Every structure is written in C-alpha cells, then in structure tokens.
Image: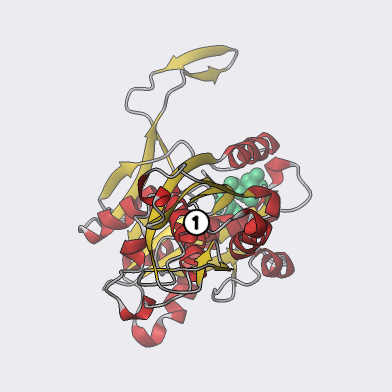
Amino acid sequence: MSRLAVLIVAAGKGERTGLNLPKQYEKVAGKPMLRRTVEAFGSVGNRFIQVVIGPGQEALAAEALAGLDLPSPVRGGATRQESVRLGLEALAASFDENGAPDYVLIHDAARPFVSRQIIEAVTAALEAGARAALPMLAVADTLRRKEDARWSIVSRDGLFRAQTPQGFVFADILAAHRAHAATPVTDDMALAELADIRVVHVEGDERNFKLTTREDFSMANAILSAGETRTAMGYDAHRFTDGDHVWLCGIKVPHDHGLLGHSDADAGLHALTDAILGCIAAGDIGQHFPPTDERWKGASSDRFLAHAASLVADKGGVIVHCDVTLICERPKIGPHRQAMRARIAEILGLGIDRVSVKATTTEGMGYTGRREGLAAQAVATVRLAP
Ligand code: CTP
Ligand code: MG
C-alpha cells in the first residue's frame, strides 16, 4: 500500500472576498468552507490530511475543524507557494520515523466542491506511475487581452484552466519547492515543470471552482441548497407462524400469530431500510445483513434501518421523508400508528411530521387476504449534497 498524504492550504487572507473572516473560515451553507474541503477528502478513504493555516488563525481553525481527527494545523507563509513548502516540510518531519509519504495531493481550502472522481483520478494517475497529475478544464468563454486601449481576441485553442488537487510524488515536489523557493509561481505544477517532471493531465470539474469573490459564496450556497433529491422504494413480506406478537415498524404488536423470519421479521422496517438503501443505490438489506449470518438471527430490525441511515449520512445526505404502507387483514394497525411513526422518527433522527405510516387490507384477496402473512412497502426521499 502506498502512503498518500493530502496537504490543504488555508493560510490566505481571502482579501478579494471583502468578507469579515479569511474566506476559508466563512460558512458555506452553514459549515466553514475549510471543514467542507477537509471532509471531502476524509470521505474518500483513509488519508493523512495536513492543513496549513495563517498566523493568528489557530482559534478559527480549531473551531472550523472541531471533532475531526486531524494532526494539528501547521503555520503557512506570506504566499501560497511558501505555505505549500512549509506544509510539505511538516509532512516530511511528521512522517520521519516511517519514511515520507509516497504521494501528496496539494489542494486549495478554497475549493470545497472537490469531487470523489477528481480525487480518485489524480490518485489513480500517480499509482499508475505518473510523477505529477494535474486536473484541467478547457476554456469555454471567448478570451480577450487588453493592450493599451485595444482589445484583441486570444484564441482559446489549447488553453486550459488548472485546478487542484494537484498530485505529486512526494519527494519530487518537496525537492522542487526547496530548489525554487525564490521563483514566484502560482501553482505547484509550475514548480514540477521547472524541475522537468512530466505532467499527466486528468479531467477537471466545473464544480470544483475556487471561491474567490463574495459572488462565489452566493453561488456555493445556491448549489448546496439545491442538492439532489432521490426517491426509492422497498418491499417486504413475511409469513405468519405460531406466536403471540409481531414486530412492525419497531413496535411490538400483540397478535394471535407471530411472523417467521431470520431476524425479528419486521416487514415495515425492512421495506423502509430497502427504500433508503435504494436512494443511494447501496444494494439491499440482504446484502448488508445476509440471512445466512448467525449474527442477525432474531436481531431487532432497528439496527438495519439505523445502518442504512448512517450510509446516507456518510454521503453527506439527509433523509427528507418516508412513507410505509403495511398490508394485512390483522393485526389492526390504527391503534399503533402513532407509536410506529414515533419509533421510526427516533431511529432516523427525523421530525415525526416527516414519517408516515399507513395500512390497508387487500379485501380478503391474495396471501395477505388469506392471512398467510403480511407485506409492507415503503418509499423514502433523500437529499444528497451535490
Ligand atoms: N493560501 C495560503 N497561503 C497564502 C495564500 C494563500 O495557504 N499565503 C491558500 C488560500 O488559503 C487558498 C489557496 O491558497 O486556499 C488559494 O489562494 P487564494 O484563492 O488566492 O486565497 P487567498 O489568498 O486567501 O485570497 P485572496 O488572494 O483573495 O486574498
Ligand atoms: Mg491569494
């Protein structure tokens, strides 16, 4: 396994935003931008993430990064270039006993929308043998250059915009920064090129823009409030057997039969778990909790539902609403409906007004009508951060 470090530079002053705080500590949809950026990397595998902050920003950084398992931020310099070099030196020192990291991804704190695809593309290029990997995007607008009082058109043929994260063989980029500390450049790839390191290009991402102005913050807030909404369904059925109660939607309901199943046979929670897994295309309940696994024998199904909810949260998603329909002649659901809604709301951490439980019979028709078993279907809606 190669060792990969991520260096996130957050030591700037953010002067172009005209906002009160250095921009990396300003909130984007309620969360400091720096925290969003760090979490974007944290959610893509286990990585060593080193943050570089400006002098006097310790308290702001501590607040923005509270609760995250990170090494202490190190102090940057007067320019981005200097901040990166100081960060690389800190990485070299902190890895001392075990040797330096093999690769480093260097990223601007001001790009909180960095995607899993970009992180993986840059990493994959390094692991495939590239010594430097640069995400780039073609230029779409017509470009003009002002020369004295005249504007001339600049052909956009062959022009690209460089983004971060830029990926490097750690020893290469540390050496390049040390050797060219006195040559001012605007990104790390420029130093790699000065050091004659061949660069591999990967596809950038329009969303991975650098928040520079106040308008960029408005746009970022708009993107996050939009999000992406997904709806999915789930279905489950269990056969009646001997017993004196059934579990439905997390509630123990007295009945003249029980339900047959490997776990507690709570068809309501099983259908809902599948609906939530469906929203994030994360397979189905049987895949996560195989019925062949002894651990789930007799298990109470609230843990299946809580697991599905945690997978949504891991993706930065929020469950917006869920709706369960129980299909049976008996037991009567009405008297338990409120308790079922409350229990589901509790497991999912949702307001009860976002949880619906309904019931119907099938008028004596089919297996539920013959009282051989009962069925449940569920629909869930999830909003995913873009
Ligand atoms: N950066 C840094 N150290 C500096 C200057 C910049 O670590 N001395 C970081 C910024 O925090 C940012 C990234 O480099 O994450 C890109 O820089 P930029 O967008 O220019 O941010 P600022 O320099 O903070 O903004 P401005 O130029 O508007 O003052
Ligand atoms: Mg700057």
Residue 41 % position (x, y): 46, 60
Decide: is 210 above or below 254: above
Decide: is 131 above or below 59: above
- Residue at image point 39% right, 35% down: 137
Q: Quadrant of residue 348?
A: bottom right
Quickly name the residue at label 1.
312
- Does label 1 point to a residue whose CB lies under 8 Å from ligand 1? no
**Front position in the image: 182 or 48:** 48
- Placement of the N terminus among the 4 image quadrants: bottom left
**Front position in the image: 221 or 54:** 221
Q: Quadrant of residue 106?
A: bottom left
Residue 303 % position (x, y): 49, 70
- Residue at image point 38% right, 88% down: 97
Display colour scheme: secondary structure
**Front position in the image: 14 or 366:** 366
Residue 215 % position (x, y): 67, 34
Residue 150 visible here? yes
- Residue at image point 58% right, 17% down: 148
Residue 45 % position (x, y): 39, 65
Decide: is 120 above or below 250: above
Q: Is 272 placed left or right of 281 in the picture? A: right
Under mark 1, the amino acid is: Val
Q: Is 336 placed left or right of 158 in the picture? A: right
**Front position in the image: 122 or 67:** 67
Q: Name the secondary structure under disc 1.
A: helix
